[in-house]
């Protein structure tokens, strides 16, 4: 509960500063005459300077009253600077945010509801699951931009050495456990699986709602939720997962895969380029398949968005710029610069995405990713104090996997703490 108290204190401090600085007052009138739009992005310079400056120049030519001021920031700095700028009454007009950060700011009434400035026709240009990712109380608070959806990357040679017929990738979690045991038996210095556990993603992929939509109260005390967590705990108990896998995360999994010591890697397909550059021998044995965990084909996605602070004096124009940057033509141009996918369905129909680049695995990665996009969702939590709620579940996962508590006890205690946080936030009262 200490993390909740700290988060609550920070949230209250932010609320008070914003109250006195006026960042939630009635919107100021749109400023007349030539307008400067300040745009903040994350880690795009210098590689994409030419692309971004070309977009801004094109927008300025179409809107002669506009002058765009572009600031690019490291991801680890942007939230601190953004919150300070909002509290100080000098926010950017358009800001690049992860879905989780956009929802956090929307919950604090710091972002403008994009949906109030966007037509149905404009919204329909985006994949529905991605468009609704930053949704809160029936409003959309960010325009989706570029996206990476997870796939299952695997080492054919390790599967063959473990006795798997035709080096076929597992098609279920039961088969993953079977493969992990076979790798342990035949290749004791290697690992079959190295998961980055996001238990809420697992529940959503299994169509298990995490909380009651009206009250916000936890729903994960029941047997199907416990079984999903217990699956990881049993793998760890059988020594089929590395001792440090919860600490090392993606980087630990990627390093072992590049060393040829990991059979399965669940990650974005863009990591194939890094594997190819750093470990060409492993890359030569690599194949991919769609993520097989959901019967409906749903897949977790990491999404970047563009949002507009509530205290921007040029919200309508800022939304226009966000829509311009993310329209299907400009997203297609961006996809030609970087191996990521677009959030607009029309751009993915371009022949660029089906044209061979001479690398069969890269071509397959594009095909697999495009097939998954209509079912891709950024599963960031849209509840008050989402970060504290996520920390509760992370602690429950750790205590269950390390054997400090049973999976049932860990989730029951997390659910009790979850409900207290939600009750203190007044979430249920707002929805009555």
Image (cartoon, rainbow, N blue to C red):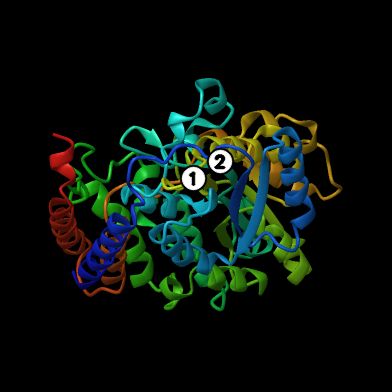
User: Which badge, 1 or 2, is on the more N-terminal residue?
Assistant: 1
The reply to whether dot 1 and dot 2 touch (C-beta < 8 Å) is: yes
Q: Residue at x 76, y 37 (%)?
A: 61
Q: Residue at x 62, y 30 (%)?
A: 345
**Mark 1: few/some/many CA within 10 Å (<14, 14-19, 20+):** many
Furthest-front residue in this view: 33
Dot 2: element: helix
Q: Is residue 390 visible?
A: yes
Residue 394 horizontal/vertical position (percent): 32, 65
Q: Which residue is mark 2?
A: 318
Dot 1: element: loop
Query: What's the CA distance linking mark 1 and mark 2?
Result: 7 Å
Q: Is residue 418 left or right of residue 265?
A: left
Residue 265 horizontal/vertical position (percent): 57, 60
Q: Nearer the viewer, residue 170 or 18?
A: 18
Label disc, if present, on residue 393 of the rendered structure: none
Furthest-top residue in this view: 121
Residue 233 horizontal/vertical position (percent): 32, 65
Residue 251 horizontal/vertical position (percent): 56, 71
Number of marks: 2
Q: Nearer the viewer, residue 391 or 43?
A: 43
Point out the image quarter for the N terminus: bottom left
Q: Which residue is mark 1?
A: 308
Q: Residue at x 62, y 55 (%)?
A: 153
Q: Is residue 155 visible?
A: no
Q: Residue at x 67, y 59 (%)?
A: 44
Q: Nearer the viewer, residue 172 or 97?
A: 97
Q: Nearer the viewer, residue 84 or 345?
A: 84
Q: Can you say whether 29 is above or below 12 in the image?
A: above
């Amino acid at each position: 509960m200490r993390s909740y108290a700290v988060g609550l204190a920070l949230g209250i401090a932010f609320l008070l500063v914003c109250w006195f600085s006026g960042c939630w007052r009635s919107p100021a009138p749109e400023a007349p005459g030539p307008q400067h739009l300040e745009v903040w992005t994350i880690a795009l310079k210098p590689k994409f300077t030419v692309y971004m400056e070309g977009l801004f120049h094109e927008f300025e030519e179409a809107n002669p009253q506009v002058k765009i001021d572009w600031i690019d920031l490291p991801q680890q700095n942007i939230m601190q600077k953004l919150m300070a700028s909002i509290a100080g009454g000098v926010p950017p007009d358009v800001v690049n945010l992860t879905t989780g950060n956009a929802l956090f700011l929307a919950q604090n009434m710091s972002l403008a509801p994009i949906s109030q400035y966007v037509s149905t026709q404009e919204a329909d240009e985006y994949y529905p699951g991605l468009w609704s990712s930053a949704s809160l109380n029936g409003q959309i608070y960010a325009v989706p931009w570029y996206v990476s959806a997870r796939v299952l990357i695997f080492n054919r040679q390790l599967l063959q050495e473990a006795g798997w017929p035709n080096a076929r990738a597992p098609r279920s979690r039961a088969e993953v456990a079977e493969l992990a045991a076979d790798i342990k038996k035949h290749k004791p210095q290697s690992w079959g699986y190295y998961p980055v556990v996001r238990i809420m993603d697992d529940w959503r992929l299994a169509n298990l709602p995490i909380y009651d939509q009206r009250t916000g109260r936890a729903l994960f005390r029941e047997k199907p939720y416990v079984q999903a967590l217990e699956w990881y705990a049993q793998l760890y108990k059988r020594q089929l997962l590395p001792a440090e896998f919860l600490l090392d995360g993606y980087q630990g999994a990627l390093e072992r895969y590049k060393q040829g010591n990991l059979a399965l890697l669940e990650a974005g397909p863009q990591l194939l380029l890094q594997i190819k550059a750093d470990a060409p021998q492993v890359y030569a044995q690599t194949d991919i398949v769609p993520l097989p965990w959901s019967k409906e084909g749903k897949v977790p996605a990491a999404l970047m968005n563009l949002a507009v602070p509530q205290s921007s004096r040029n919200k309508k124009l800022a939304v226009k710029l966000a829509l311009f940057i993310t329209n299907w033509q400009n997203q297609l141009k961006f996809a030609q610069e970087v191996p990521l996918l677009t959030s607009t369905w029309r751009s993915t129909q371009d022949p660029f995405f089906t044209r061979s680049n001479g690398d069969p695995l890269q071509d397959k990665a594009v095909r697999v990713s495009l097939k998954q996009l209509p079912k891709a969702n950024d599963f960031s939590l849209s509840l008050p104090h989402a970060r504290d709620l996520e920390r509760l579940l992370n602690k429950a996962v750790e205590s269950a996997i390390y054997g400090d508590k049973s999976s049932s006890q860990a989730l029951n205690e997390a659910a009790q703490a979850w409900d207290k946080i939600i009750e203190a936030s007044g979430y249920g009262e707002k929805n009555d």
